[in-house]
Amino acid sequence: MSSPIPLHNTLASDTDWQAALRDLISSPAELCAALDIPPAALGWSEAARQSFPLRVPRAFVSRMRQGDPRDPLLLQVLAGAQEMQPAPGFSADPTGETGSANPHPGIIHKYHGRVLLIVTGSCAIHCRYCFRRHFPYADNQNSRSEWSTALEYIARDASISEVILSGGDPLMANDKQLAALVVQIADIAHVRRLRVHTRLPIVIPQRITEGLLQVLTHSRLQSTVVVHSNHANEIDADVVAAFARLRTAGITLLNQAVLLAGINDSAAAQVALSERLFDAGALPYYLHLLDRVDGAAHFEVDRAQALALHQEMAARLPGYLLPRLVQEVAGAPSKLDVGT
Ligand SMILES: *Cc1c(COP(=O)(O)O)cnc(C)c1O
Ligand code: SF4
């Protein structure tokens, strides 16, 4: 057994992001007031909010434009009336994650060599297009016993060389919990890489605490953090500082985005995002086509249009700043490039 990872100052730093988490906006009236937008201008739907609550940290709201109901950050969190219109081809589980790919609680094993470990079902922000909006997990921490079943599964399969902490948002767990988990993962000899899929560095940049950096760097595992940002406006000075802390600690930093109609479906928006990410020390990794989840049909960009947009990006960006345009297809051995 490894000894626990030493943690310094984590109580103080955990306190900061947890305070931001307790103080987030969950009422439409408060969101309207913060942005100086009359409620009638928003196209708000109470039924949509009932099906997936409004949840957005103040730091993210502070990057939205005042008085603009079409702001690209606002549209990602706004529970709009369009969500309630049924759309053919859209379902509650478009990626097949509740079926055979999810045979063990807390694990999704779809691709060779890597598994998703669901650390927690909760998130700091509720993104309206998210395929997890209907995912059947409770809004709380996985129990330690569920983690241990998941870890046993990983230990039994020597083909698994990478563990991806996912959710929800895995960084909703505190540094102490993550430290305990990473120690146990590092104890499995065939696991070499640790990846964290998270939106927290974007929406609450204080989440990148000293304690977290220690968790990610004080084991034999090589760590990658894949953040999730969809628009250049999401990356302000605080996010840049959070990325810098990760990069200074030697962590590989990548971004995944979702292509969203009315939010980032222009070459100009995508080029700006790639350049902003690189300025901040992150490389664009994936640009996902929307998963066809109930309530998100109004965000869909059609395939041909997505492909044309991607070709336009290719003509304007260096190769290393061009994310792969991919699609999640149930049963496929990897994410699939669109257009192949
Ligand atoms: C996206 C995803 C991964 C990671 O895929 P990469 O191509 O390695 O980034 C792993 N497991 C599941 C279930 C996924 O959806
Ligand atoms: S899992 Fe990611 S995309 Fe989905 S709601 Fe949480 S933060 Fe948003």
Image: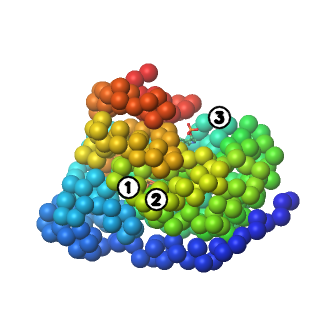
Residue 145: horizontal and vertical position, in percent?
70, 64
Contact, mark 1 vs mark 2 (Cβ under 8 Å): yes
Residue 232: horizontal and vertical position, in percent?
36, 49
SS assignment at label 2: helix
Contact, mark 2 vs mark 3 (Cβ under 8 Å): no
The quadrant in which residue 265 appears is top left
Front residue of 246 and 289: 246
Q: Which residue is mark 2?
A: 239
Q: Which residue is mark 1?
A: 234
Residue 333: horizontal and vertical position, in percent?
57, 30
Identity of the amino acid at label 1? Answer: Glu
Q: At x 22% / y 64%, what residue is drawn?
A: 66
Identity of the amino acid at label 3? Answer: His
> What is the crowding at mark 1: few (fewer than 14 residues within 10 Å), some, or many (at least 20)?
many
Side of 214 relative to 26 (left or right): right
Q: At x 56% / y 63%, what residue is drawn?
A: 208
Q: Which residue is mark 3?
A: 112
Q: Examine the rendered structure and indicate whether residue 9 appears above or below residue 64.
A: below
Identity of the amino acid at label 2? Answer: Val
Ligand number 2: quarter of image: bottom left
Which quarter of the image is occupied by the N terminus?
A: bottom right
Q: Examine the rendered structure and indicate whether residue 34 appears above or below residue 197.
A: below
Front residue of 53 and 42: 42
